Structures are given as C-alpha cells and as structure tokens.
Image (spheres, rainbow, N blue to C red):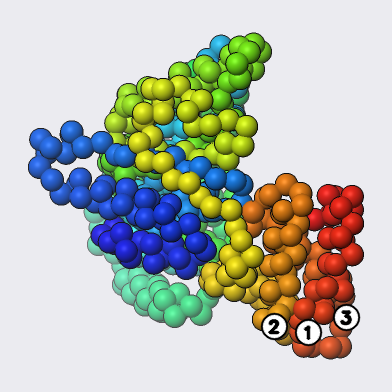
C-alpha cells in the first residue's frame, strides 16, 4: 500500500464527512508504516508506531475512520470494545485475546492472497474432477477377474479396449470444453466431503484461550472423519472443489508464518470505548477490574510477546488506535503509563447542521442513496430535493441538541421514521415517483420532534 497521506485523506473523504485532523493523523501513521518497511533493518527495529487516541462524542466518525482505513490499506484490522475485557481473575475476556483475533484476521488475508496465486491451477484441477464426475472412466476388462495372474496385466490392451479408450478421451475433451463455456452449470453431480466432528471448547475462563487452542488442535487430529454425500449443481461444485484444491496447493506452514509476520508489522487494533475502563475514585467492585484492564493492556501496547496457536506474536510494531467519548472522564484519568503510549491525541468535533447535509449527500454510500437504491427495487424513483435534505439535517441537529447527542446515528432514526410509511406501501403503490421536499419532511417529523417525551422513544 503506497498511497501518500494526501491520497489516503482523499479516499477517506469519499466516505466520511469532516474530521480532517483525525484523517490527517491516521494517514501519517499509515504512511510511516510504509516508510518503516523501507529503512535499514538496524533502524527498522527502533521505529515504533505512534499510537493514536481519538476523543469525541459518539457518532462523529471515530470507528468509521479506522474501519475505512483498514479496508483501504488491506492491513489486518480488528475492532474491540474495551468494556468486554476484565482483569485476569474476573469473569470476562483476557486482553491478550485481541492479539489472537488480529492473527486470525491476518491469516484470512494471507490465505486469500495465496489462493489467488494458485487459482488457475486450482480451477484446472477442479475441472478435471468435474469431468471425472460427469463421465467416469469405463471399467477395465483386466480388472473384472480378481483371480487373474499378474502376468495377464502385462498383456497389451485389446483393440476393443483401445477404441473404447480413444472414444472416452474424446468425450472427456468435449465435456471439458462445455464446462469451460459454462454450458453444464445446471447439471447435478455428487460430491463426498469429509469433516471431523470437533467439539467446541468454551471454558469462559480468563487466560485460558491458548489452552483451548491446544485442546482444539488435539481433537482435530484424533477425531474420526465423517464422509457425507452431497448433491449440487456443477456451478456450486466448482466453487467447492476450487476451494479444496487451493487449500491442497498452498502450504499451511507458509501461510501461518506469513500471517504472523503481517500481523506484527502491519496489524491495526482499534480499541473502542477506552474511556469506560477509567476507574472512579472509589476503588471497589467493577472499578478494580477496570484498573486491572488498564494494567493488562499496558504491556500489549508497549510491546510484548503473545502466544497464539500459530506461534509467538510480538506487538512492538502493531498500531493501536483508541477511541472514547470521555464524557464523564478525561484522558488524563487513564494510567500515566498508558497515556504515554498514545502520543497522538485527536479531538473530533460535534456535527453541525451543515455536516448533516454533507453526510446525506456527499459520501458514496450516503443514506439518501441507500434508500433510493432500495426503493428502486420496487420501481419507485425517490427524489430528494435540496430543501428536503436541509430540513432533515435541521431536525437531526435540533434533536441532538435537545436530547442526548448521538451524532450521525440520529439520521438513521429520522430517515427510518420519515420513510416508514413509504417502505410499507411501496409494493402496492401506483405512484412511481416520490419527491422528498421540506413539506414532506415536516409533515412526518415535525410533531414527533416537538413532543420531547415522544421523541425520546422514537427519535
């Protein structure tokens, strides 16, 4: 991934409105990873990622920036909630499990890349197997009598057998051509698949994930295989066989080693709701566990070695992006050591009315475009006029100001309320062109937005 910071920001702008400071910070962090891969090995070990902490209310784009960034770079990425982890000794997940999830994500990326490399050979082998299924080889006359002496197998094939063999090969070639042209996609074939009945081990004990992996691998080796016959079309069978052949062509050890290396050097872990693990002044109950999560999180962010089922993984060069609203706490309430591991602080701004207008119109997958596409499946053209979009933005901004500010997520509830009747009646409607203007919006949203008690439950 060799995009410049400016190009990364431009790509993020296609999906996320505003928050330029946060976009610039993550773009620089990603570019620095590209730069690190190109410095001398002696210096590469010394360069550590500059972790980022994004601070801002919910619904302003913190998670979306990280998610789009991972999609853009193709790097291993996981999003975790800080609140689902507890200190070892309490009921909950061990913080080290986030690293194991990252390696699983990297494994999926590497496996897909390797499958793409062997795709042509896998398709060829899959087609060979399909030809065998559609036209099995004729039984040889030499194999009809099991009591024949060995000398009889050295006899040359008879004229009839040679003719039959030539005819069979000619038919195989015809079927292969038909398969390549897609003329036999609806034919049915039978495939025998083998699976192992491996029990799922759910201990729910903190710190026991690695032991669970060991038990899982042990059962995979000793569990008996069960053979299942499945009937499917040639089209379905081809995909199934390509996947099987691809797995046989790629080296499992090579994939695992590459996955660990990819996770170590390019992995991104997004820790959401980090403000929820700030302990209050009274250290009791859950607060003790929250403080413990910070202590357990610290070595992972600093850089440590975690045992996974694919080997040991170092977190020294994993990029950590933390995010939190920090309504009731401040970043300074975190442990000083943990604060120091997030040197880049970015504050995201509350969304304004103009931001809501841009969110409804500019992104490639904006809400207005989504609903237009949905209604088009019912042959209904949905037209959003400028004053209608402005009215929607005004209502969203006003409701956020009166009640809890949930950012852009307010648009989801308002849009659903606005188009609820239309979505229900669409299949039976004769009118095929619906215009959403200010009057249309006011008629359906105004009463609800003014009634605060009602809007708490609906909007």
- Quarter holding the C terminus is bottom right
Would you call the spot at circle 2 few (<14 residues within 10 Å), some (14-19), or many (20 or more)? few
Mark 3 lies on residue? 428
Q: CA distance from mark 2 to mark 3?
A: 24 Å
Q: CA distance from mark 1 to mark 2?
A: 11 Å
At horizontal 47% and vertical 68% (from top left) the residue drawn is 14
Disc 1 element: strand
Number of labels in the image equals 3
From where the camera sits, is residue 58 visible?
yes
Could you say where residue 348 lies in the image, as x and y percent from the top left? 51, 50
Residue 401 horizontal side relative to residue 50, left or right: right
What numbered label is drawn on residue 434?
1
At horizontal 43% and vertical 58% (from top left) the residue drawn is 20
Position of 314 relative to 20 (above/below) = above
Of residues 195 and 267, the one nearer the viewer is: 267
Mark 2 lies on residue? 385
């Amino acid at each position: 991934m060799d995009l410049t910071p400016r190009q990364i920001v431009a790509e993020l702008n296609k999906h996320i409105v505003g928050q330029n400071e946060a976009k610039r910070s993550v773009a620089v962090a990603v570019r620095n990873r590209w730069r690190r891969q190109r410095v001398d090995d002696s210096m590469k070990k010394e360069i550590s990622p500059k972790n980022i902490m994004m601070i801002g209310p919910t619904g302003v784009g913190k998670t979306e920036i990280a998610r789009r960034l991972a999609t853009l770079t193709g790097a291993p990425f996981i999003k975790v909630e800080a609140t689902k982890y507890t200190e070892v000794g309490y009921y909950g997940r061990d913080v080290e499990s986030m690293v194991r999830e990252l390696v699983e994500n990297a494994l999926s990326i590497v496996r897909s890349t390797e499958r793409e490399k062997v795709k042509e050979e896998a398709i060829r082998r899959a087609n060979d197997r399909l030809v065998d299924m559609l036209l099995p080889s004729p039984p040889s006359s030499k194999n009809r009598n099991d009591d024949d002496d060995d000398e009889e197998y050295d006899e040359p094939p008879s004229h009839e057998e040679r003719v039959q063999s030539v005819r069979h090969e000619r038919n195989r070639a015809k079927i292969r051509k038909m398969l390549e042209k897609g003329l036999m996609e609806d034919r049915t074939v039978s495939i025998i698949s083998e699976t192992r009945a491996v029990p799922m081990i759910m201990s729910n004990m903190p710190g026991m994930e690695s032991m669970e992996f060991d038990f899982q691998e042990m059962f995979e080796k000793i569990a008996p295989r069960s053979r299942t016959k499945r009937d499917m079309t040639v089209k379905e069978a081809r995909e199934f066989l390509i996947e099987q052949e691809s797995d046989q062509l790629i080296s499992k050890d090579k994939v695992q080693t590459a996955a660990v290396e990819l996770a170590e050097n390019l992995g991104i872990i997004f820790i959401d709701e980090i403000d929820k693990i700030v302990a209050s002044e009274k250290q009791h109950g859950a607060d003790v566990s929250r403080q413990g999560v910070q202590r357990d999180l610290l070595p992972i962010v600093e850089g440590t070695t975690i045992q996974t089922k694919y080997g040991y993984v170092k977190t020294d060069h994993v990029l950590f992006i933390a995010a939190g609203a920090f309504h009731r706490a401040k970043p300074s309430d975190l442990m000083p050591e943990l604060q120091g591991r997030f040197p880049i602080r970015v504050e995201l701004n509350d969304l304004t009315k103009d931001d809501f207008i841009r969110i409804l119109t500019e992104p490639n997958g904006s809400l207005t475009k989504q609903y237009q596409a949905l209604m088009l499946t019912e042959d209904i053209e949905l037209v959003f006029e400028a004053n209608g979009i402005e009215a929607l933005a005004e209502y969203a901004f006003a409701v956020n100001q009166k009640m809890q500010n949930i950012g852009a997520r307010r648009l989801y509830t308002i849009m659903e309320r606005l188009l609820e009747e239309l979505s229900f009646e669409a299949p039976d409607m004769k009118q095929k062109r619906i215009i959403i203007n200010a009057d249309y919006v006011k008629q359906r949203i105004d009463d609800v937005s003014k009634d605060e008690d009602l809007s708490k439950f609906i909007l």
